[in-house]
Image (cartoon, helix red, strand yellow):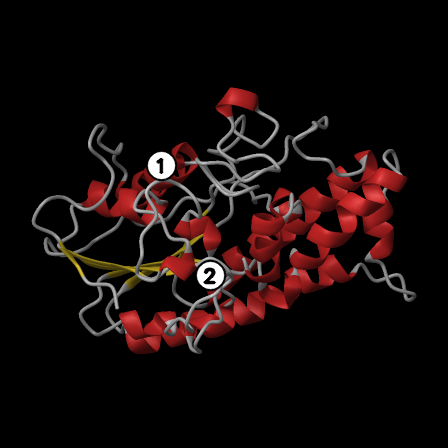
Amino acid sequence: MSRWLTRTLALPALAALVLAGGPASLAQEKLHLPRSIDYVALGDSYSAGPLIPVQRVDPVACLRSFNNYPAFLAGYLAVTTYRDVTCSGARVRDFSHRQTPVIPGPAVRPQLRALSRRSDLVTVGIGGNDFGLFGDLTSVCPFLAQQHPHGAPCRRHFTNARGVNTKYRDARRIQAHVGTALRQIHHAAKHARVVVVGYPRLLPDKGTCAAAPFATGDYPFARKVGLLLNRSLRRAAAAHRATYVSTYGVSRGHDICAGARAWINGPDNTAEAAAFHPFEKGERGMARHVFRVLTGRVAPTGGDAMPPPGSVILNP
């Protein structure tokens, strides 16, 4: 995710810790799609799945996995045409403008170019990079925690002289950004069902852990930033004819402190996932929940990565 992911890949990053979710939100109506589904996935690194095996090369700079949640969802829905243009580091602006990738490489095409009047389903996972919401936390919070491990130094740092917590403020402002993106999506894909997927729970409701080395008093601060971000996504979806799917409830017990049950990787890049980003099991868990919410059915098991044989994958 922009500066966040750049630092994540270069240093132990903490920003993703603050991505919490809101209360569980189920679609009021089930998915109604034609038998031949044209599916387009838009989003940032939480949709793309950086470092999850196996990484795609279209382009390699997006750090997009064959086993991310859009790919699993495409398999569950048995789509006939699939375009995954999610890209690590993406901001809302990158939906309509060329994106500078987080690792060296040519600029990435605007994600909205993957949409057309033929699009039936669009999933959207975006927002965490806007206003540098998490990038600043990545560099500042770990340093401050070392100096004041039991206080709330990061919360204080991001509270200005007028008493305004700038991270809370910016998390609220993201609603307008996502609203703009949803209007653009509806314009480009006039007949599509648009689904906004919220960020999963990354911190436990109580307690701390070494995998999330914030200062003790900054855990509530970090959780609230994530809650406000997901609320912005939910409100933007409600205002712009989109379905919001929360992954907060389903990820309870799978937060970054959950050990072997965690859906989210810890502070180091591994061969399984980027630091503080979902493992394959986290992407699969999110996909299964999105499928259940949209269709009312339990996702099939076994052979669930990628669209089924015979599907057409059309990535620019």
Q: Is residue 87 left or right of residue 78?
A: right
**Residue 99: horizontal and vertical position, in percent?**
46, 72
| Foreground of the two, 60 or 159 | 60
The image position of residue 150, as x and y in percent, is 87, 33
Residue 305 point in image, percent of width and height: 25, 39
Q: Is residue 67 left or right of residue 119?
A: right
Name the mark nearer the viewer: 1 or 2. 1
Using the rendered view, name the quadrant where residue 167 is placed: bottom right
- Give above or below for 16 relative to 300: below
Question: Percent from the top left, x then y, of residue 294?
Answer: 30, 46
The kind of secondary structure element at disc 2 is: helix
Of callouts 1 and 2, the N-terminal one: 2
Give left or right: position of 256 versus 139.
Answer: left
Q: Which residue is mark 2?
A: 238
Q: Quadrant of residue 297?
A: top left
Badge 2: how crowded within 10 Å, few (<14), some, or many (20+)? Answer: some
Measure how far apart labels 1 and 2 are at the Cα level.
25 Å
* Amino acid of disc 1: Arg
Image-quadrant location for residue 188 = bottom left
Tell me which residue sits at (81%, 49%) in the image. 154
From the viewer's perspective, is residue 212 above or below residue 3?
Answer: above
In the picture, the quarter occupied by the C terminus is bottom left
Return the residue at label 1: 284
Residue at position x 48%, y 59% from top?
126
Residue at image x 26%, y 34%?
299
Disc 2 marks a residue whose amino acid type is Ala
Whether residue 124 appears in this view of the structure is no
For the question of whether residue 160 can be seen, the reply is: yes
Q: Which mark is residue 153?
A: none
Q: Nearer the viewer, residue 174 or 109?
A: 109
Q: Quadrant of the N terminus?
A: bottom right
